[in-house]
């Protein structure tokens, strides 16, 4: 049985159907479905989105699949064409039955891009919307959180501006105290199982981790490309994370 989402929830970033099934099996509350985690994540293929939604529905978890919609690696200042691509991808996620999308757009001055974000929220048309770690690049996370609330977002994924969430715990605590129940605060960025209790003790609502392991690929690889390793969701780490979230819930 999946854990309750009240105040303590677990999100696992996965890249494929195997990862979706692993996250379901350990009782995660939701996934962030993405491609190319090695570059911070990109929009996954429509095929894997459809597979993920089907697996979630089979498991009676209709709110499980949240899809990262990010058109390219690099920063978060997007051209008109990139915004248009992102809008199309969000609509495709909704048509495929996704429960939510994960987005992030900034201005050249380093503030949340209100106009673009409003356009993306409108495209989501009722789906939950998470603002990703683009917030960790802004000067004022509290003011940004206020803007996200005004724009109608559901939650924000943040490390508190640090390389690892546990090192940004003071900012996470301040963010949660500032927004209260108006916006969910989800800690993500270098989260280890041993950090989970301390992160929840700061008052946050959720933790996010990839629970990934790098495995060797024995397939032949020629000069045209093809890495000799790839990432997959580690079932053991995912289960340990779920157990740590459950323990934090019971202690609350």
Image: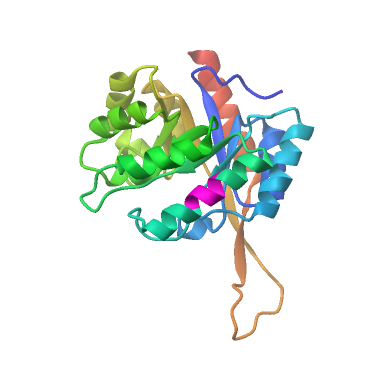
Q: Is residue 207 magenta?
A: no
Position of 204 with respect to 3 (left or right) is left
- Quick check: can you spot residue 194? no
The location of residue 163, given as percent across then percent down, is 34, 47
Taking the view exactly as shown, the residue that stands out farthest to the right is 58
Of residues 192 and 104, the one nearer the viewer is: 104
- Quick check: can you spot residue 35? yes
The location of residue 228, given as percent across then percent down, is 61, 72
Question: What residue appears at the point 32 percent right and 30 percent down from the top-left corner?
Answer: 172
Of residues 95 and 64, the one nearer the viewer is: 95
Identify the coloring: rainbow
State how many labels appear. Answer: 0
Question: What residue appears at the point 35 percent right and 32 percent down from the top-left corner?
Answer: 148
Of residues 252 and 179, the one nearer the viewer is: 179
The location of residue 218, given as percent across then percent down, is 71, 72
Question: What residue appears at the point 48 percent right and 28 percent down from the top-left corner?
Answer: 206
Taking the view exactly as shown, the residue that stands out farthest to the bottom is 223
Q: Is residue 87 magenta?
A: yes
Question: What residue appears at the point 36 percent right and 23 percent down from the top-left corner?
Answer: 202
Which residues are drawn in magenta?
A: 86-90
The location of residue 203, given as percent across then percent down, is 38, 20
Does the magenta stretch mainly form a helix, a strand or a loop? helix
């Amino acid at each position: 049985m999946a854990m309750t989402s009240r105040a303590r929830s677990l999100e696992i970033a996965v890249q494929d159907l195997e990862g979706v099934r692993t996250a379901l099996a350990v009782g995660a509350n939701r996934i962030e479905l993405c491609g190319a985690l090695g570059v911070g994540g990109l929009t996954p293929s429509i095929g894997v989105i459809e597979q993920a939604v089907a697996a979630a529905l089979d498991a009676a978890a209709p709110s499980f699949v949240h899809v990262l919609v990010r058109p390219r690696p690099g920063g978060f200042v997007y051209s008109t064409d990139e915004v248009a691509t992102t809008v199309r991808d969000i609509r495709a996620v909704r048509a495929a039955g996704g429960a939510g999308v994960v987005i992030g757009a900034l201005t050249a001055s380093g503030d949340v891009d209100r106009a673009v974000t409003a356009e993306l929220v409108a495209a989501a048309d009722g789906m939950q919307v998470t603002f990703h770690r683009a917030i960790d690049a802004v000067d004022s996370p509290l003011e940004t959180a206020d803007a996200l609330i005004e724009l109608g977002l559901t939650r924000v994924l943040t490390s508190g501006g640090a390389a690892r969430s546990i090192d940004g715990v003071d900012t996470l605590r301040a963010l949660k105290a500032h927004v209260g129940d108006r916006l969910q605060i989800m800690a993500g960025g270098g989260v280890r199982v041993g950090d989970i209790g301390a992160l929840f003790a700061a008052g946050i609502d959720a933790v996010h981790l990839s629970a990934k392991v790098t495995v060797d690929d024995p397939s032949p690889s020629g000069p045209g490309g093809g890495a000799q390793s790839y990432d997959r969701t580690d079932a053991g780490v995912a289960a340990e994370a779920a157990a740590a979230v459950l323990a934090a819930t019971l202690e609350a």
